[in-house]
Amino acid sequence: KMSSGAADLRQRKKQNCTESDKMAPEERNKESSKLGRSPKYMLIQRFAKLFFGCLAAVTSGMMYAVYLSTYHERKFWFSSRQELEREITFQGDSAIYYSFYKELLKAPSFERGVYELTHNNKTISLKTINAVQQMTLYPELIASVLYQASGSEEVIEPVYFYIGIVFGLQGIYVTALFVTSWVMSGTWLAGMLTVAWFIINRTDTTRIDYSIPSRENWALPYFACQVAALTGYLKKNLNCSAEKFCYLLVNASTYTFMMMWEYSHYLLFVQAVSLFLLDSFALAQTEKVHEVYRIYLFSLIGGYLLQFENSALLVSPLLSLVVALMLSKSLQMNMKKSTFVSRLLKIMYIYLVLTVAVTLNFLLKMFIPHKENGHLLKFIEVKLGLNTTKNFTMNWLLCQESLQAPSQDFFLRLTQSSLLPFYILVLIICLFSVTQVIFRRLCGEPLKETVKLEDGRIGERPEIVYHVIHTILLGCLAMCLEGMKYLWTPYVCMLAAFGVCSPELWMTLFKWLRLKAVHPILLALILSMAVPTIIGFSLWKEFFPRIMTELTELQEFYDPDTVELMTWIKRQAPVAAVFAGSPQLMGVIKLCTGWMVSSLPLYNDDDLLKRNENIYQIYSKRSAEDIYKILTSYKANFLVIEDSICNEVGPVRGCRVKDLLDIANGHVVCEEGDNYAYSKYGRFCHEIKMNYSPYVNYFTRVYWNRSYFVYKINTVISFQS
């Protein structure tokens, strides 16, 4: 029965493709005959529109990539810097990613380089890690292969090749957003407006300015391509060749996205929920939606195998939801009939899917050994106020700006660029239209095969409904965590641009207003051209001079103290030395010198999180003996104290590293709303600079400048109470 059902499904899909291929020319011929134009003229017009639209999309992407490259050069004076000074511009986890790219290029062969990364014992002391799996280094593997295979060694330096790929991907990102808005609205004017809003709101649409090698900068362009392909795939009356192309692109981009970013399956889960709601109300072709579910399943299985049996993918909510949806598919197919029973079954279907998904996820986590980010669950509990903690790591995460609620400045910036007001307008119109369609479906009214402009029913287009649901879900996440704005704001740009350029959206609004004085279709067509044109000119007048000023101003990034520190380490420190300090600084030391470190700025490993907390104790009120024992337990030979952390004057009291350590160590007493610090020891990072006993017995200062103090950890100590 299952095989015959699958055959029927394939037969129906073939039939639909054939019918749409046959119907499309007939409809075009009828339309052209009505307008008094020959089919040949219409074909040339369509080709010209497609050609110039594609040209505009590609040009927008290339110009954005060039803009990023020029801005980066002006900001860091990159071409006039020495290699060490260039590498210092990579901060925190970015430094680690680029350091592994360097190691791959230095390896005698690519195979040897991959082996050394998967069995890495030269980065973190007393720890062997599979760096490819733990840090998702597939972008670096691809970049190193391309660099060596293309013969670029004699043409371009490795660092330029690396950041050039990232900037190129950002160009693809913008192009994909352009195409998505174009496909939805039918005019590439919407794509141009999307790109304009994206660049103007660059502070809130991308993190490329702060962290070039971050995983999201490698991964999100592929997700944008997937969304563009999915938008086309969900459209009604799509011809067979276009549908196959979109399907293959969704396949390739989904899998690539999953390989590039360890958190990709969470974002795909949000997308899957959007498709689930879309299908639950029978607003899209079930066959297409379930094809996307199969793509998720294939990508999860492929990712599990190629990511060294990554168990986090097996216990991901995405897998549980997809399996639950597939198990419930037969029930959903039986409830497509417009009866009262079927409407009750829809509610039962949603309940069944959610119940099966939650149960399955619970069982998988129970029986499959996994190292899924358990600290994330604890963080969510504390964030929602369900729990309290004194744990240093949890409180440090809660203090990160990206994990707090978005500030008023964020909304002010979006309003100043006119993005937020138009987004809200478009979202309200689409949401009300979708609500009307859902109500009609619940009442048993079928969807129209083809929605015409004069119908004013934009909510019946499945790709529009998908984007409305998707942007609402991403918006809810962005309202909780500011870091999520980098996922939400690009789609705000795309949806707002689509709306103001879409005659269907204006027609939907005029249908509700019941305009009689002016012909609504004519007014909708005029507004869909006039409004984006006015917006474009106003943006050009206000923001173009600012963008040009950014590109012409020479900014100065110079950190002589860090340069001096790295130079001293390379010249004076033994090759086998292990350095201890803040994880962010250790990442830079690893990149610039190659020396082994005791910790790294990674937050997906419980052992490393514990290491980071222990080594951060150098900024706490602990005894010299305690700090010495902690550092020697990780075989550290040198300690680096950062004056910026030791004497930190943060804007938010209680979020400084030393404050969080005092809370975790119980050195803060709260009485009547006031906090009092108490410990019989002074703050270690201050006391060690005084050069008196017992600190000089354990540590010997060997180097210092305005920002850093380096101490050699003595090997022979006589412990005295």
Image (spheres, helix red, strand yellow):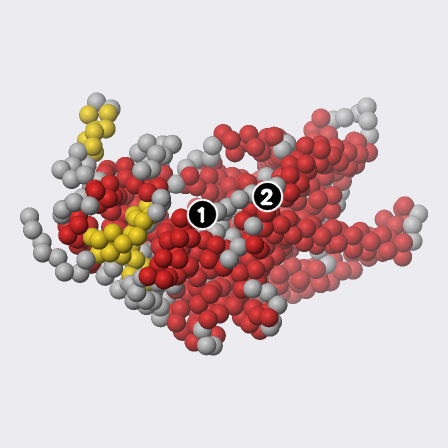
Question: Residue 718: x percent and y percent?
Answer: 9, 56
Who's the residue at 47% across and 32% down the image? 407
Question: Residue 356: x percent and y percent?
Answer: 40, 53
Residue 559 badge: 1
Location of residue 225 (image quadrant): bottom right
> Could you tell me if the residues under marks 1 and 2 are in contact, i.e. CB atoms within 8 Å?
no
Using the image, determine if residue 237 lies above or below residue 396.
below
Q: What amino acid type should be assigned to the residue bearing mark 1?
A: Asp
Indicate left or right for 46 with 664 as reference. right
Can residue 197 be seen in this snapshot?
no
Using the image, determine if residue 390 lies above or below residue 250.
above
**Mark closer to the chain start, 1 or 2:** 2
Separation of residues labelled 1 and 2 (CA atoms): 16 Å
Location of residue 445 (image quadrant): top right
Residue 667 badge: none
Q: What amino acid type should be assigned to the residue bearing mark 2?
A: Leu
Location of residue 129 (image quadrant): bottom left
Who's the residue at 59% across and 58% down the image? 164
From the viewer's side, name the closer residue of 291 and 645: 645
Indicate left or right for 240 with 650 as reference. right
Who's the residue at 54% across and 40% down the image? 204
Q: Please name the residue that numbered disc 2 is placed on.
A: 554
Where disc 2 sits, the SS reads loop
Question: Residue 206: x percent and y percent?
Answer: 54, 46
Where disc 1 sits, the SS reads loop
Question: Residue 279: x percent and y percent?
Answer: 56, 49
